[in-house]
Image (cartoon, rainbow, N blue to C red):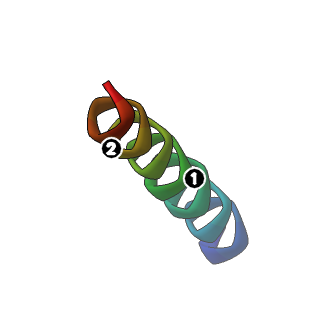
Amino acid sequence: QPLNYILVNISVSGLMCCVFCIFTVF
């Protein structure tokens, strides 16, 4: 169970980083 939580946390933080990079570029 904790492993699934870690994977979800990594995917969410990666998505936030991608959105932040897009807003920074534009």
Position in image of residue 15 (x %, y %): 50, 41
Rate crowding at label 1 as few (under 14), some (14 to 19) or many (20 or more) other CA atoms within 10 Å.
Answer: few
Residue 14, compared with residue 6, is above or below; it is: above
Marked residue nearer the N-terminal end (2 or 1): 1
Position in image of residue 25 (x %, y %): 37, 35
What residue is shown at x 29% (from left), y 41% (from top)?
24
Instruction: Please name the residue that numbered disc 2 is placed on.
Output: 20
| Residue type marked 2 | Phe
Position in image of residue 7 (x %, y %): 67, 60
Q: Nearer the viewer, residue 17 or 3?
A: 17
Q: Nearer the viewer, residue 12 or 5?
A: 12
- How many numbered discs? 2
Residue most extreme to the top: 26
Q: For mark 1, give the secondary structure.
A: helix
What residue is shown at x 57% (from left), y 52% (from top)?
8
Q: Nearer the viewer, residue 13 or 18?
A: 18
**In the picture, residue 26 is in which quadrant?**
top left
| Residue type marked 1 | Val
Residue 7, compared with residue 11, is above or below; it is: below
Which one is in front in this view, the residue at disc 2 or the one at disc 1? Answer: 2
**In the picture, residue 6 is in which quadrant?**
bottom right
Q: Which part of the image, by quadrant, shows the N terminus?
A: bottom right
What residue is shown at x 45% (from left), y 57% (from top)?
13
Would you say the residues marked 2 and 1 are in contact, meaning their CB atoms lie under 8 Å apart?
no
Q: For mark 2, give the secondary structure.
A: helix
**In the picture, residue 20 is in which quadrant?**
top left
Instruction: Please name the residue that numbered disc 1 is placed on.
Output: 8
